[in-house]
Amino acid sequence: MNILHVLSQYEVTGAETYAAALIGRQVRDGHRVLVASDTFSTPVEAEVVPLPIGRRARLRRLLNIVALRRLIRTHDIHVVHAHSRAAAWVSFFATRGGRVPLVSSLHGLQPLHPTARAFSVYGEVMLAVSAGVRENAVQGMGLPAARVRLVPNGVDLERFRPAGAAVAAEARRALGLPPDAPVVALVGRLSGPRGPLARVAVAETFSRIRAAAPGARLLLAGGAAAPPDVAAAVADANAGAGEEVVRWLGHLGDVRPVFAAADVVIAAGRSALEAMASARPVAALGETHYVGVVQEATAAEARASNFGDTGERRAPDPGRVAADVAALLADRGHRERLGAWGRAFVARHYDADQVWRRVEAAYRQARAARSGLRIPVVMYHRVVERAADAGRHGIWVTRERFEAQLAALARRGFTTVTFRDVAAHLDGGRRLPRRPILLTFDDGYADNHALALPLLRQYGMTGVVFLVGDPAIRANVWDAGSGEPAVPLLDDAQVREMAAAGIEFGSHSATHAHLTQLGPERLAAELEGSRQALEARVGGPVLALCYPYGDVNEAVKAAAEAAGYRFGIASDSGPSRFAEDLFEIRRAQIFPRTDAFGFWKKTSTWYLRYRASGRRLAGGG
């Protein structure tokens, strides 16, 4: 994929650090990356094109739009990723009128002026770094909830690692710190909303810390220049102590030595995560409020507010911050336990590999929405020889009717595709046929092999069959007690033959469970376990998850994405357009009573939208 990142900034910010980490991952994964920004100081393996994106004069904005259009065309860009409102504004108009989508990262709370609610420039998909930012976007700005995805910062756990005693000692020596002094690091940008926090930390908080921990040192890491009031506070603190107890280090290309040297880190946003990944305890002090020491009791608030950067604005109490930091400095054992917990916490929620998969999924969603994909998706279960062979549930069609339906598709010029084909198209590598259609089969009944496969072969068509992952389940045990007869499922030999014939297989969970009724651990096991088991069984990737019973909510969709699926298949829920939500793809079910006219309706690209309107056309099924 060819990706263009657009930023507006004049100093290194969390947005640049976020973008740089993302670009590194994208380049390693084989994507081609371009950056357009006022400045970009972080080294990246991508071409950086200087553009004054942050300048908002009308003529300058128009020139920026023209320049971005030229970059998109010249470099065959597949997706544009903006990292601020100013960047989103010019990117929005640069991408209109074409098929290149815009994805915007929302790194902080956005202004709630009337134009923000009346007109969104954030593109097809928005990535909110925290729940607070997402709530601001959806409830405050009125952005569509389905288009605002919660995708936090990602941290490279190989790059940010706990420092051993030797590394910590060398870091202190290089920074000119006493080897045994208690060291506190305040990490993050010092300008903008963070400026007053830095001044208070130096002028009020640190004096209290030194009273409790004599000999303590404070490192300020971040910012191209210290604001005058911060510089004055640093000078006053050092003059009062008679030695340099506070040091401003400025912007650092590599902040890891600061984490190695520090006993406690005061930070928010991405800096807090990097410190925790380095096994350093963090007191989360951000632009909106003070969360406290990040630990089990405060973890939920820390995650929701991006560690104090997004939430209800509350002035921090310098005394409370100082007391929390002093308590940590006084208890080395607690610091070590908290450091180990923090690294595990980051690994669980912010691992860069997991986050990049979610960003990549957002790119695919944006490409799908922008491409205008219109793919009918129909749902079958069983194909039987005659009605007498079927059960009580109306989830079957006869072989004769199924053949007539395939013949009708052939006459109308449809070409069957699989989710593999759709994925390749969204990745920029394959064009879809003029009239694509997806035929899906739930549960994986043995009659799909005996009766459906020969007809699919006869008409040169394919389909997608959803199997349960538990190999011990060999019949429709989920129907036990409902009066439905036991029906055998596909065995391994049948699955292999169908796979060789081009049939794609997806997951129907491990045990055909009601997914919305499961706790997080059981849900993850149902989804991840079934995908892994089925990939081993079919000898290839399993891209799609079909929710049993059509039972899905936002938590299930998020779990499906985290489990490594690229598509989530619903039944009678989800948007009426195929491309609007790739994790809740709505289908039209084919019933025994679906006649020729009903089948024509259900395989038409307009059918789901028409049905959602509440109107009806006559016709069976």
Image (cartoon, rainbow, N blue to C red):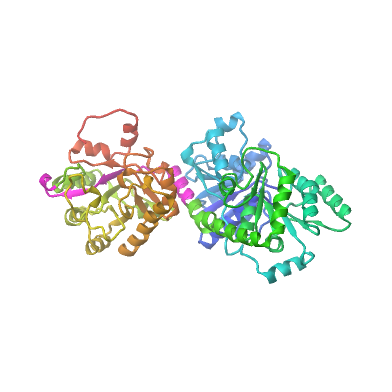
Displayed quadrant of residue 210: bottom right
Q: Position of residue 49 (x, y in %)?
A: 64, 53
Q: Position of residue 19 (x, y in %)?
A: 60, 53
Q: Nearer the viewer, residue 416 or 470?
A: 470
Q: Is residue 241 visible?
A: yes
Q: Is residue 23 above or below residue 437?
A: below
Q: Is residue 89 above or below residue 25?
A: above
Q: Quadrant of the C terminus?
A: top left
Q: Is residue 247 above or below residue 68?
A: below
Q: Is residue 11 visible?
A: no
Q: Is residue 222 magenta?
A: no
Q: Nearer the viewer, residue 431 or 607?
A: 607
Q: Position of residue 555 (x, y in %)?
A: 43, 45
Q: Position of residue 185 (x, y in %)?
A: 72, 56
Q: Is residue 377 magenta?
A: yes
Magenta segment range? 361-389
Q: Nearer the viewer, residue 8 or 511?
A: 511
> Residue placed at 52% from the left, 51% from the top?
77
